[in-house]
Amino acid sequence: MEINNNIAQIKDAVIAIKDALLQTRYNIMQHANKEMLALYYSVGEYLSHRTAETGWGGKVLESISKQLQQEMPGLRGFSGMSLKKMRRFYEEWQSIFGSLSKPQIQVNNIRCPFIASDKINQIPIGSLSTTQLDQQALEDFLTVQFTHHYEILLNTNTIEERLFYIHRIATELWSVEKLRYNLKEHLYEREGTIPNNFDRTLSEPDYRIKATKAFRKNYKLDFIEIEDPDEWDEHRVENSIVSNIKNFIMALGFDFSFMGNQYRLIIDEQEYFIDLLFYNRRLKSLVAIELKWTDFKPEYVGKMNFYLSALDDMVKLPDENPSIGIILCRGQKQKTVEYALRDTNKPMGVATYRGANELPKEYEKNLKLLDGLKDLI
């Protein structure tokens, strides 16, 4: 009996130590990544300023790299090309993080014993911080490795698109190969920022940013096989979602909790039913989803506005944020959505969805073109 108890206790001890070890390793890696990003940004700032002042070209950077290798044998990550990447990293993000070149006598409050005091002010190593990103976005940024960051810079043009990929990498642990694939497939254009009215209806900046990031433009529902669209409607889609609620929550993203389907509201002795109701822990708000088996129509907005008013008045708790509505349709057109949402006063967005066996519309067009070529041949 005592042997069995010891075996169980040893097993528990191994699990506890293993978890502590893995957590510590993760923390060390996270801390190291933050420090390396700050270093690369600082070096990039230095090189950018010197290039602007003196017109440094690629040959100068190659010479700097060779000299570094001689001074520090075995040094990796500071080739001429790497130095160019650091410079671009700074130049692309300087509008968000600004300058780190304020004089500092110490690095992380500790005087470095390997650097002469008369040289320590040349490239101060600060920390990457900003008020232009919310805390979650900043944490995501500092979690992502430099190689991923540079791939994003090569293939994107806007801060919103970059933050989209950074958030997905941080939360879904993409490899560089998966990032390249999703960039090539233009994932942001298909699943990026959901058309919404959050900028007008959500006054608190941090909540507005979180709400924008919480929803996608398009959702692929891998658990639904739509062979014949004529046999489907929103009720069948709803039943499939409820039967596969775990998979649907995974498609939505993190922090969603399911509160029910056909959620009943009684107003003036009349029953009304919301297709799907969720609660998002990060947003601290109710999320109402209306399913449609058609392209978006402007009249859908009025119904959702009505539901959100009722939820805020009858269901929302005092310490929760305003309820958000998502109209989930088969398709949408930009201007129609924009005009429909323009003068509404409740936060909502319009997203689209497709089944596992359905291709994005841009691919369907390409297939039709191929079919046309086959007929000509």
Image: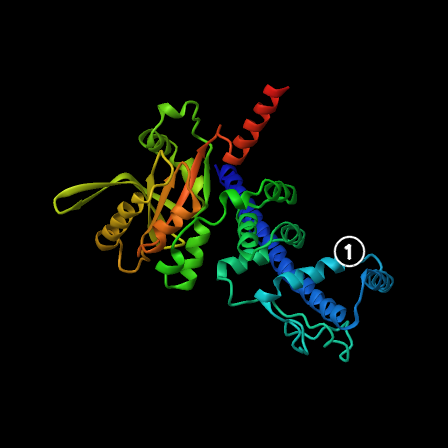
The residue at the point 17 percent across, 41 percent down is 271
How are the residues colored?
A: rainbow
User: Which amino acid does the dot numbered 1 rest on?
Assistant: Met
Counting from the top left corner in percent of width and height, residue 232 is at 36, 26
Counting from the top left corner in percent of width and height, residue 227 is at 44, 23
Disc 1 crowd rating (10 Å Cα; few below 14, some 14-19, many 20+) is some
* Displayed quadrant of residue 49: bottom right
The residue at the point 65 percent across, 64 percent down is 38
Is residue 79 visible in the rendered structure shown here?
A: no
Element at label 1: helix
Count every numbered label the image shows and give the total. Answer: 1
Say which of 197 and 321 sits in front.
197
Whether 259 is drawn above or below 224: the answer is below
Q: Is residue 51 left or right of residue 21?
A: right
Is residue 340 visible in the rendered structure shown here?
A: yes
List the single residue furthest toward the front: 376
Counting from the top left corner in percent of width and height, residue 185 is at 59, 40
Q: Is residue 179 left or right of residue 314?
A: right
Q: Which residue is mark 1?
A: 81
Counting from the top left corner in percent of width and height, residue 167 is at 53, 51
* Displayed quadrant of residue 177: top right
The residue at the point 48 percent across, 30 percent down is 356
Quadrant of the image for the C terminus? top right
List the single residue furthest toward the bottom: 118
The residue at the point 36 percent across, 23 percent down is 231
Say which of 12 and 289 sits in front.
289
